[in-house]
Image: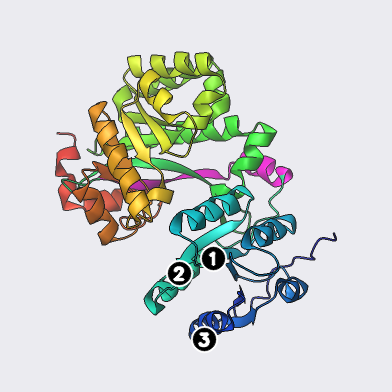
Amino acid sequence: MSMLNITPSPANLPPSLVVIDDEKAIGDLICDIADTLGYDTNAYTATSEFKSSLTGREDIIFVDLLMPDEDGVEILRYLASEHIDSQVVLISGYDKRVLKSASVLGKALGLNIAGELKKPFTLKEMKSVLNNCLIEQTASPSIHNDFTLQDLELAIQQERVFVQYQPKINLTTGSTYGAEALVRINTPDGKTIPPGQFIELAEKSGHIKDITRIVLTDSIHFCKHLQSIGWDINIAVNVPSVLLTDVRFADEFIEQIELAGIKPSSFTVEITESALAENYAVSLDIVTRLRMRGIQLSIDDFGTGYSTLQQLKNFPFNEMKLDRSFVSDIHDDENKAIILKSIELAHDLGLDVLAEGVESKEIEQELLRNGCDHAQGYFYSRPVSEDIFIQHLQHSPATEHNKVM
């Protein structure tokens, strides 16, 4: 099967939306709503016609799971084989668990699954999905998908790797108690490349060590600067699996902190479940020594790995970080149940709970009702520069108790 010739849509053309659904009325309804938002739309009732019309430049594709000739899973498999990077929304009359499984499958295939709609859906639900797609398009433009290893190496060599900081909020007091350090790359023409477009490349090439050490060094300097102007803020850094197999890592990190004159508890090391599983004994060695020296430890993306309970039992975590895939859809009954039980489990084990991906007041209130301790997300702030983060602290009245007296 020949690959599609995928090229980005010209900048002067409206965004495009395609629907594949054997119910013509459904396809027409979706297109009518999308038309009002400025999309160029097309609807198809047969997969053969859909495939022959696909250009690879579609911004959003709606896929019905129950098609008479090829089912939705086969269509997802086809889109993945053609390396389609459009946002994909799944629609179906199946129960929610089937719809959710298809969504997980699509993501596992490498597709950009942007939403789900269970039939019959309301106009409000339809508009909400489209609006979310518009937000994602604005927040994550795919303009640097051709970022190469040479580009990465040049960025490191030319010191264009930098760090932004996203505030972490105490849900009970409303105070900003910490920040997560998030890496970015500046291009020579001044654009910013998000980590999703270079982290995998860095991991495969081995440059993730260089990038992580840049993040650690910048975070230590920023933490020291914050303390010098009166702010006691905890900074969280993500540590990849490759450094959790290097027994020298703990010593190097602790030595840097001590040389800067900062107390170790000013830092949290975030580690994913999958990273711990790669070399169990060495990982346990490193994180135990980090905790013994006072550094905080967070299990990141909780609930997305395969050995979660074993990790919680054996590793000395202070914090459980709820994955955004659960948090962003907290009103879903199953997600809500997972979040509630996760919070209960964490508290029974003496861990605080941080929810990432909080994007609305409604999500914040639901987390509060369920006993969540901390949160971060666009509802509070996007990742920002050091100067803007300091401004955020200065304009947040509930952060007074974090000031160094």
In this rendering, does residue 139 appear at all?
no
Front-most of 77 and 404?
77
Tell me the distance, in whole angstroms, between the alpha carbons under discs 2 and 1.
8 Å
Position of the N terminus by quadrant: bottom right
Label 3: how many Cα within 10 Å (few below 14, some 14–19, many 20+): few
Report the span colored magenta. Answer: 149-169
Q: Is residue 156 magenta?
A: yes
Residue visible at 48% across and 86% down?
36
Question: Element at badge 2?
Answer: helix
Residue 172 vertical position relative to residue 126 in the rendered view, above or below: above
The residue that disc 3 covers is 32
The residue that disc 2 covers is 129
Tell me the distance, in whole angstroms, between the alpha carbons under discs 1 and 3.
16 Å
Label 2: how many Cα within 10 Å (few below 14, some 14–19, many 20+): some
Residue 38 vertical position relative to residue 70 in the rendered view, above or below: below
| 2 and 1 marks in contact (CB < 8 Å) | yes
Label 1: how many Cα within 10 Å (few below 14, some 14–19, many 20+): many
